Image: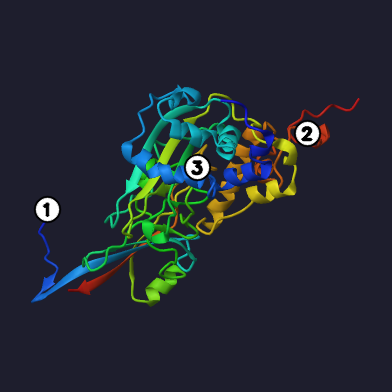
Amino acid sequence: MPHPHQKNLLTSVQMAHFVATGSFRMDAVVPDEMNQQALEVLKAGIPGVPYGTPLSEAFVDSEFVQRLVQLPEVAGAIHSLVGPEPTVDHHAVHIRKANEGEAQNLHGDAIIDVRPDAFDVQLMYYPQDVTLEMGGTLSVPGSHLRRTNESDTGRYQNLLGQTRLVCPAGTVQLLHHGIWHGGRKNDSSIDRYMFKIRFNPTVRQVRLWNLEDLYDPEVARELDQSFPWYENATGRLEKYNRIKLWQALTGDDTFDPEFWVTRVSNRPQRVVAQRSLNPHATKKEMA
Amino acid sequence: MTATAAPAETGQQTVRQQVLVLYLASSALDARVVGWSTYDGTGATHPTTGDSDVPPYATGLDALKDGWRLFQAAQLLPPFPGHEYDVSFLKHEFFFEKLVTV
């Protein structure tokens, strides 16, 4: 795939937003003409793709999906997050049927994944207007760094500040692999469609976005935000872990504007006390 | 020891358990609610994932004031050595019940 234009890459502030929240959302980024086609295409099914197929080769049999991932804004966001030529892990069409009686448990996809300096991204495309009643995807901002396994979080029904997706047709969101999410119960009379692709990076995810604003103070503000569902103490650990991820993505282990990492790493080695103050030092006999 | 089923029935009345799980911002029971789940043993309601953005109570103490009985609180466990900065499940989980005659 061609390198996206600089203007379509994410900014540093947008990347910091992703690192803090675990998601990046683009409302109505897919043109109406494609959204109109989408339901028929998704109903017919998208041909399977073997794990690890390069993105440029993965959808040769699906012109629609090629167009989707090559939309300038979508391609720019994918490149910014996972770099050039990611591979496709898997894809799926998810349908929440009209008046469906059940919601999915809150879960993270695949299995527990604690890579400190790499992440997969899941693209979710919504071809229809999604109302609250249609059961748009539930996701929990800032949950992606929690070390939990798949649906072990199923006991959590609601968390303060959760996102119950309501969006216009053509919305795409890109989610960190670890984010807690689930399809909500569809209480409407309309089947709700969502198309998902999981991407694996094939390069180190270091400075892949538009770096012009790397030192914008808004970067630090994004990274320092809290979420209503965070416990008081653990919320501080979230910031610590976020800074560690930002340091990995920028290749700059000195970036720590609020000193969450620096403070607990400070172990000076220089000794300045005089030797004579050491009670264990051998006393010299006076001549 | 022989286990005997204790029927939750008195005369013609049947008792069922409603369970409320609150996740609080600290280990204090009067801390603010940050997450919640409910399970209704009467079958009259069907709470589920992502069905509300508004917590049923502002604090754990408010649930007590409304008649919920606390029956389990999460232990305070020190972090495993080497994992002091890890984040995982919500730590401050409190289980409440109401017994309802149906």
Residue B61 or residue A223, whichever sits in front: A223
Whether residue A285 is visible here, answered yes or no, is yes
Spatial distance from mark 3 to mark 2, Cα to Cα?
A: 48 Å
| Disc nearest the viewer among 1 and 3 | 3
Classed neighbour count for the residue bearing mark 1: other residues with Cα under 10 Å, few (<14), some (14–19), many (≥20):
few
Residue B4 or residue A82, whichever sits in front: A82
Identify residue type, mark 1: Met
Q: Badge 1 sits on which subunit?
A: B
In the rendered image, residues at marks 2 and 1 fall on the same chain? no
Q: Position of residue A208 (x, y in %)?
A: 64, 31
Q: In the image, what residue occupies the spot 48% across and 44% down?
A: A33
| Left or right for A159, reference A45 | right
Classed neighbour count for the residue bearing mark 2: other residues with Cα under 10 Å, few (<14), some (14–19), many (≥20):
few
Q: In the image, what residue occupies the spot 58% across and 32% down?
A: A79
Spatial distance from mark 1 to mark 3, Cα to Cα?
A: 52 Å
Identify residue type, mark 2: Val
| Left or right for A100, reference A243 | left
In the figure, B20 relative to A48: above or below?
A: below
Name the residue that disc number 2 marks.
A271
Spatial distance from mark 2 to mark 1, Cα to Cα?
A: 65 Å
Q: Badge 2 sits on which subunit?
A: A
Q: Position of residue A168 (x, y in %)?
A: 49, 54
Residue B1, label in figure: 1
Residue at far front of view: A33
Residue A175, label in figure: 3
- The answer to whether mark 3 and mark 2 are in CB contact below 8 A is no
Label 3 vs 2, first from the N-terminus: 3
